[in-house]
């Protein structure tokens, strides 16, 4: 199984490791041993052998020049080596970490009992983050939304993935939010992507090779013929991307774009296309190293160092609303009967400027059978002294009502003054409530 680590999470784990915190100063001989062992691990595993030799030689030259002399501890040395590896390779997958416990565990994997304990530890860790599924919901217009923080090991996260796939299977469209997804297991990406294609036709998703203990392995991953949920063939798909979308998240987006199966919305991704592995260096350090190369199923290209360019480039913070608007519009084009949905929800998704306090104060008051108050900067709607909900200004005098989808209010002005409150129902009918003194 090819593992694509969570780049940001990996960094945080080893930087906070208790084992890494108990430091003794490294002697010059120990630093030289680390650099030599690092170079050996690099040359044995890096996907580009010629570059590996050049990079290893660069690290040795920097060592001989005294560039690492001032590093007071292992953590600092690891940071400096990471920076030099990335500078020499322009590959963001590289990192050097300090984790004696992990190194010991790597060796202990030869012991079946210890290996089983480590796998259970990993499973429990992923369970605490719900195997990457950070949020599932339906947006207005019956559009399914999946917030995926990372791609979990499907051996552990299969049930969570199956539940998510069943949750979205009835959506008219689906949005995958990968803006802050730092990667993970390519097999989980394969499982989720398979839901978007027919199961009776051969369709390759990823083609790649990697080094495994000195031998070259070539693999292709295809749409799975059997799934735990209905397929979403024919339904529009949108993928949200950001500058922190990395590795497997980028491949998910890139492949779906190449195959014409998804529209990408957001910012250009980070540009980390290579699968990686982690190798021990001595007794305290590890090297996270790219071990292979992945190619898309259309023209065998990748996006290493360049990133994936979305179809609609927009600030990542605004990407969800933009995708929601686009999904509603696309559904309306395919089925004119859904144009009413697109028109109804458009005001809730349009960019807007917050109203001034004076504007909110002008709305507050008594209307037939109801009242609007301004409290702590928000409009509060009260009906018959029982129902109390917050109102959200949408622009153009419209007010959305907390938790209500089938009607909204509109301020009615005459001669510059607010004289009534219209209730606009989704079916187009209107009731008017006069403002009271």
Image (cartoon, rainbow, N blue to C red):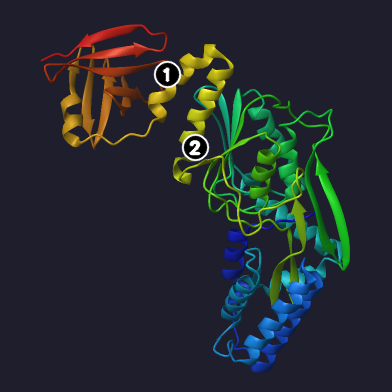
Q: Which residue is mark 2?
A: 320
- Local packing at callout 2 (Cα closer than 10 Å; few below 14, some 14-19, many 20+) is many
For image coordinates 60% across by 87% down, the residue present is 24
Q: Which residue is mark 1?
A: 344
Residue 327 in which image quadrant: top right
- Look at the picture and state if 116 lies above or below 190: below
Counting from the top left corner in percent of width and height, residue 217 is at: 87, 58
For image coordinates 59% across by 91% down, the residue present is 66
Left/right of residue 351 with respect to residue 282 in the rendered view:
left
Q: Secondary structure at mark 2?
A: helix
Frontmost residue, 82 versus 54: 54
- Residue 389 visible (yes or no): yes
Distance between the alpha carbons at the discs numbered 2 and 1 = 18 Å
- Residue 282 visible (yes or no): no
Frontmost residue, 24 versus 241: 241
Q: Secondary structure at mark 1?
A: helix
For image coordinates 78% across by 75% down, the residue present is 43
For image coordinates 56% across by 79% down, the residue present is 76
- Look at the picture and state if 369 lies above or below 155: above
- Look at the picture and state if 206 lies above or below 84: above
């Amino acid at each position: 199984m090819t593992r694509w680590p969570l780049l940001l999470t990996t960094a945080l784990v080893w930087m906070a490791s208790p084992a890494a915190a108990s430091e003794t100063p490294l002697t010059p001989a120990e630093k030289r041993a680390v650099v030599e062992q690092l170079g050996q691990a690099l040359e044995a595993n890096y996907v580009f052998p010629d570059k590996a030799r050049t990079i290893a030689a660069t690290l040795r030259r920097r060592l001989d020049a005294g560039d690492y002399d001032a590093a007071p501890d292992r953590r600092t040395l690891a940071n400096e080596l990471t920076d030099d590896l990335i500078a020499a390779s322009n590959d963001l997958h590289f990192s050097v970490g300090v984790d004696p416990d992990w190194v010991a565990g790597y060796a202990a994997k030869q012991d079946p009992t210890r290996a089983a304990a480590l796998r259970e530890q990993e499973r429990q860790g992923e369970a605490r983050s719900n195997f990457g599924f950070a949020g599932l919901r339906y947006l207005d217009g019956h559009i399914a939304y999946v917030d995926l923080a990372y791609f979990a090991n499907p051996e552990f996260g299969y049930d969570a993935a199956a539940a998510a796939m069943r949750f979205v299977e009835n959506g008219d469209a689906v949005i995958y939010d990968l803006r802050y997804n730092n990667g993970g297991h390519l097999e989980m990406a394969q499982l989720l992507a398979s839901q978007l294609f027919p199961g009776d036709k051969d369709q390759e998703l990823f083609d790649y090779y990697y080094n495994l203990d000195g031998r070259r392995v070539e693999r292709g991953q295809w749409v799975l013929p059997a799934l735990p949920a209905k397929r979403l063939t024919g339904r529009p798909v949108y993928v949200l991307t950001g500058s922190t979308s990395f590795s497997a998240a980028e491949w998910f987006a890139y492949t779906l774009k190449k195959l014409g199966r998804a529209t990408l919305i957001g910012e250009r991704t980070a540009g980390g296309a290579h699968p990686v592995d982690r190798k021990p260096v001595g007794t305290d350090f590890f090297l996270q190293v790219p071990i292979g190369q992945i190619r898309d199923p259309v023209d065998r290209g990748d996006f290493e160092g360049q990133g994936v360019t979305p179809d609609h480039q927009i600030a990542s913070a605004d990407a969800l609303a933009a995708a929601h608007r686009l999904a509603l519009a696309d559904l309306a084009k395919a089925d004119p009967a859904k144009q009413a949905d697109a028109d109804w929800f458009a005001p809730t998704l349009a960019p807007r400027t917050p109203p001034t306090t004076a504007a909110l104060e002008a709305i507050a008051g008594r209307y037939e059978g109801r009242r609007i108050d301004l409290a702590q900067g928000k409009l509060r709607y009260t009906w018959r002294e029982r129902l109390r909900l917050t109102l959200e200004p949408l622009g153009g005098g419209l007010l959305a009502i907390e938790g209500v989808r089938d009607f909204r209010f509109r301020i009615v002005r005459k001669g510059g003054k607010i004289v009534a409150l219209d209730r606009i129902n989704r079916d187009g009918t209107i009731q008017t409530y006069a403002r009271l003194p």
